[in-house]
Image (cartoon, coloured by chain):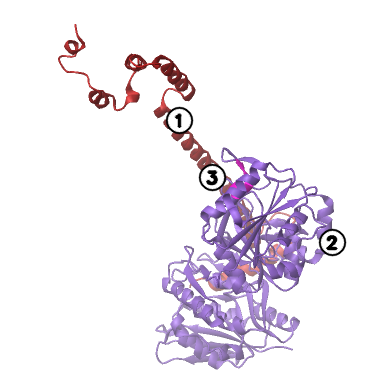
Chain colours: A red, B purple
Amino acid sequence: MSRTDQDGGVPKTEESIVATGGSAEGLTSAQMKADWATSEGADSLGTEVERLRELVGPDELAYKALKLELWRLRDTVIGMEAELGNVRGRCLVLEREREDAARSRIEREPDTSEGVDDFIAAAAKRARAFRERGQHK
Amino acid sequence: VSQLISVLTPVYDPPEAILEAAIRSVLDQDYPNFEFCLVDDASTGPHVRRLLEEASRNDPRVRVMFRNENGGIVAASNDALSLATGSFVALLDHDDLLEPNALGAVNHHLELGGDDADYLYTDEDQLDLDGQFVNAFFKPDWSPERLRSQMYTCHLSVIRTSLAREVGGFRAEFNGSQDYDLVLRVTERARRVVHIPEVLYHWRMLPTSTANNASAKPFAYDAGVRAVKSHCDRVGLRAEVEKLNLPGTHHVRREVIGEPKVSIVIPTGGTKRRVWGRDRVLVVEAVRSIIERSSYRNIEFVIVVDETIDPSVIAALEELLGSRLRLVWFREEFHFSRKTNLGAANATGDFYLLMNDDMEVITGDWLEELIGLVQHTDAGMVGCKLLFADGTLQHAGHVYSDSRPHHSFFRYPATEPGPSCLLQITRECSGVTAACALVPAKVWHEVGGLSEELPNNFNDVDFSLKIRHLGYRILWTPHAQLYHFESMSRDTTVTPDELRFIQTRWDAQLRTDPYSNPNFDPMRSDSVRRFPSHSK
C-alpha cells in the first residue's frame, strides 16, 4: 500500500506539513531523520542537531519562554524589594508620628502622677488658657 | 531700644468668640510697646463693630478703621498698613492667636541682632476645632530657596514698616497669597532675615481656612504660583514655576544658561556586585545609566581607577564612552578623598559632579535640575535625592546635631512628604553627600577639594562645611533622583579618628544646624520634637 493510499489520496507536500505543524520545528526527530536519509551525510547532521537540542533544552520556543520567565522573576524581585522597602519605611513613618504625637500630648495634658515636672504643668496651664479663650460661645 | 510694633489685623465677619480671643491675645501681650491696627472690611455681623469699638475705647493702643464697603483682604490689609505708626508691622489674622510673649520675643531678637533686621518670622502651630494645639511647624533659619518652594515663613511674620511700604504693600492680583507675595518682595530687599525658633502664633483650623482644609481656597495656591513666578522675574531667575501635588508647594525649574561642560568624577575599583538579583559591574552600569537616561549631553567622564582593576572593565567603559572617557590611574591604597581630588585635578568641566560608582540614574533631567540650581543662586553645592535598591531614602540632605552628622529621614519611603513637605521640595540644608553632588569648579578650587585627613568617611561633611564657611549655601533637590546601592563598593566603618577630626574642626557647626530647629530632638534626624521643649 502506497503512502498516497494511506493518506486518503491526498499527497503529503511540504506546504501541508507547514500548515499543520506551524513550522519545520513541529517535525519529530524521526520524521526529520526520514527526510534527511535521502541526502548524503544526513545521519551525522541529524546527530549534531540532536546534540545541540540537548544543550539548548527541549526546543527554542521553550528556551524563549524560559528567558521570559527569568525576566518576570527579576521584575518580581525588584517589585518585592520595593514593596518590602515601602512597608519598612511606612513603619518608620508611623513610629515617628507616634513618638511626635506622644511628646506633643504630654506637653498639652500632663500626667497627674507623682513627679510631674513644673514645666509640663506650666505648659498645660498656658494651653488651657488659650483653649478657653478660643471656645465658641 | 524698645521698638513700637504695629499688629495689623483685617477683619471680616469672624465668629464673636473667635474675634474676641484674637483681640485678647494681642491685648494680653507681656510686651507693652505695641499698637493694634484693626480694619473692619464692612462686616455684616453687628458684633464685629461692637467688639472693635469696645477694644478701642478700653485701650488707647487699639486703632480701628471701618471700611464703608467690602474690599477684600488685600484692601483691608493695606488700610491697616496705612494706620501703622510703629517701626515694624506684625501680621495677625482675625481668627488666630498670638502667644503672650510673641511681641516681647520679637523685640528681644531685634535688640540682639542690631538694626539691620528687616524681616522676622517665628514657628507656629495650629489650633484645632477641639481647642488643641496641633501640627507644630518648627522652621529652619532663613532659607530663600525653600521660600520659593513653599510659603514656609507664614505666621508670625514681622516686617519693617518702611520696607513694607517701599515695596508697595499688599497686591490685589495675588489675593489669597498676598502675604506670600509681600514676603517675597520684602526678602528680596531685606538686609537681614531673623528666625525666632519658638511657637508664637496659633493658626486656627476653621472649616473655611486652609489651615484645616487645603482645598478650601484653591485660588490661593494658584496665586502662590504666580507670586513665585513674579519673584523669579524680578530677580532675573529664568525659570518655570510648577505646582506640585502637595498643596502650596512648587518646583522652580530653572533654565540652563548655555551648555556648560559637566565633569562626572567617579572613583572606582571596578567592583562587581549583585543588585536586584543580577550581577553587575557597578561603575559600568552607573555610566550606562547616565548616558542612556540623561537628557543633558555636554558631559565628560573622569573615571579614577585602581591599578588592579580588571581590564574588561576598562574595555567596557571605553566601548560605552569613546572619546568622552578620561581615565585616571590611582596607584595608592584606597583613599576616597585623594582619589576624588585626583579625578577633579584631571577634570576640564565648568562643574564637577562627584559620584560614587554604585549609582543608577532615575530622572532623565537630573543634570539640568542640578546645573540650574547652582547657576542661578549663590549655592556652592547641590545634592540629589538618593534611594536604596528597595526604594527607601538613602539621602535627603544632612542634619548636623548632637556633634554628629546624620542623613535626614534615612530609610523613609521615597514618597513620604515629611513634616511640612520638606522631603518633596528643593531646600537649603547644612550639607549633602558627595555620593552624588554638583559643585562649580570655581567653588571646588576655592575650598581646596576634599580634605585628605579624611580618607574614607565624613569628607563630604567637612567639604559641605568648608563651602558654607565661605558663605555659599548648600541645596538639596528631590527633582534629581538616583539609586544609590550604598556600601556596595567600600567599607563604611567609621574610625574614631575621623569622627574626632570633624568634631574638632567643626564643633559649633555640628551642634547647631540652622536648617533644622532647636525644638527637634538632637538625637534624631527625622524632625521629632524635643522633649521637654526647647523653649520651656
Distance from Cα at disc 2 to Cα at disc 3: 40 Å
Look at 80% across and 56% down and name the residue there: B454
- Disc 3 residue crowd, few under 14, some 14–19, many 20+, Cα 10 Å: some
> Badge 1 is on which residue?
A66
Placement of the N terminus of chain B among the 4 image quadrants = bottom right
Q: Which residues are magenta?
A: B280-286
- Residue B122 spot, x, y in % from top left: 64, 74
> Badge 3 is on which residue?
A82
Q: Nearer the viewer, mark 1 or mark 3?
A: 1
Placement of the C terminus of chain B among the 4 image quadrants = bottom right
Circles 1 and 3, Cβ within 8 Å, touching? The answer is no
**Which amino acid type is shown beneath numbered disc 3?**
Ala
- Using the image, name the chain to which the residue with label 2 belongs: B
Distance from Cα at disc 1 to Cα at disc 3: 24 Å
**Which amino acid type is shown beneath numbered disc 2?**
Thr
**Outermost residue to the front:** A40
> Badge 2 is on which residue?
B504
- Residue B452 spot, x, y in % from top left: 81, 58
Give above or below for A88 relative to B107. Answer: above
- Residue B320 spot, x, y in % from top left: 57, 50
- Magenta span includes B170: no
Q: Quadrant of residue B30?
A: bottom right
Query: Residue B525 vs residue B72: left or right?
Result: right
- Using the image, name the chain to which the residue with label 3 belongs: A
Look at 23% across and 24% down and name the residue there: A16
- Using the image, name the chain to which the residue with label 1 belongs: A
Query: Residue A94 vs residue B352: left or right?
Result: left
Q: Nearer the viewer, mark 2 or mark 1?
A: 1
Magenta span: chief secondary structure: helix
